[in-house]
Image (tube, grey):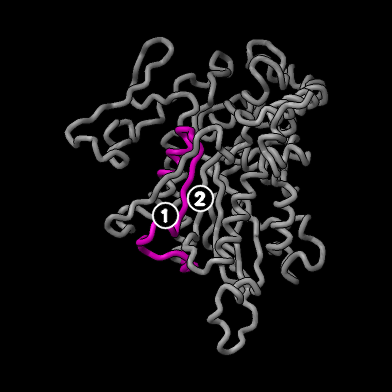
Amino acid sequence: MKQQMQDEPAPLDVENYPVAPKGLDLEQVHIYVRHGERTPVRVRMSDPPASIPADWQMCNTAKSFHETVAGLSPTVDDGLWYKKVVENRHGKTSEGLCLLGELTDVGKQSTYSFGTALRSLYVDKLKFLPQKLEDERLTYFRSTNIARTIESLQHIVHGVYPPSACAPGTIPSIIIRNGVDENLVSNTLACKRLALLELQFAEVAVAIWNSRLEPLDKKVSKYIGGRPLRLDGTPRASGILDTVRSAAAHGFRVPPEFSEDSVIGLIEAAVTAEWFDIFKSEEGRRLGMGRLLADASEKMQRKILNSKDPTKLLVHTTHDSTLAALLCTFDVFDDKWPPFTSSVTFELFRKRAADTPGQRSFSSFWRQRDEHYVRMRYKNTNMVLPMCAAEGKHLPGSPEFCTLEAFRRRVEELTPRDWVRECFPRT
């Protein structure tokens, strides 16, 4: 049986977007999007018979120093510019050569398209955002401090609000945190307990899955120097999956065995278990995603209680691991690796309480009486969250609309009271 080499990207489907039931008003949107297509993070399978190129000449745009930073630094002289040139391990340079793990021209186009789709949906179709951005506080754009996510966000922002759609003097900010403060990823750098948990879950996956991968050796070992395919092998199974999927996403030929479901499906199952089973544990969820979800929940609450809070669209560029962790945390992960430029979205809706003449002027009081709901979406699909399945925890007749109360209660359970203390390694 054959399957797509790369789980098909799911561009934002504006035309078939499911508009909320009548009476629900969209209040705020939180989006977590994986960066666009990139090169593999290591050179693998470059020797025959696999012959996947070690050098990728797919980074032809934005190689100019001036193009990259002129919009960010007012001190750059228009007459001063440099060209970024990549040199390979043999000391050779060539136009458009990519670094390992770099966002390619394909990735730049897909993230820009994602941004234009966001504009088509939330500006043009839903009229949720204005045609022209005059107040930067309407939006919140944040990235992890990795070149490919920062570049992805730059292209997304350009799609949502290009300079022509911004009022004079209005420039959207791209927010980045220091690594120790980062919560858009499962931060093992700052949380040693989480790093230990990751290692433990990876060791369990090795014990379970290596023997299941063994039958694949006769098909794929010839592509990795005759070595066995294992989670902890050289190269690692996760690296093989990364190289094969990255190459396929860019149109490179990959060995035909990796189009067989019995091969690629088994590798994907093993690697997703190794990487993401930790988020099927309560402690992994708390330490890995608790702070991120607490941030989102607090911003939703602020929007509800403060009628003057202008923030409506929040876009975060992050990684496949974050999307999978969020899906696992809410028990809706499909055990498939999140595609490039795929996204998880949380939409906050308000259902107004019945008006009493003359009393709506007490806006903060009445806003608290309004009903609020959260809808989670992934790959253009509404996620029906098991935690909201019970009666009274979702909008009657629409189980995908979780009550904000149920959503916040679960997030509160997942939020570490003292993250630093909980992150301290245990003996």
Based on the picture, tell me whether residue 73 belongs to the magenta stretch: no
**Label of residue 190 in the image:** none
Vertical side of 72 occupied by 172: above or below = below
Q: Is residue 16 above or below residue 105?
A: below
Q: CA distance from mark 1 to mark 2?
A: 10 Å
Q: Residue at x 53, y 19 (%)?
A: 43
Q: Quadrant of the C terminus?
A: top right
Of residues 268 and 34, the one drawn nearer to the viewer in this rendering = 34
Image quadrant in which you'd find residue 386: bottom right
As drawn, 134 above or below 411: below
Residue that mark 2 sits on: 315
Q: Amino acid at mark 1?
A: Val
Q: Mark 1 sits on what residue?
A: 160
Q: Position of residue 250 (x, y in %)?
A: 49, 33
What residue lies at 70% left-to-right and 58% top-to-bottom? 407
Label 1 sits on a secondary structure element that is: helix
Identify which residue is drawn at 76% across, 64% down: 393
**Boundaries of the magenta span:** 125-154
Mark 1, residues whose alpha carbon is within 10 Å: few (<14), some, or many (≥20)?
A: many
Question: Taking 13 as reference, is 333 left or right?
Answer: right
Question: Which corner quadrant holds the N terminus?
Answer: top right
Please state if 266 lies on the left or on the right of 33 as rendered: right
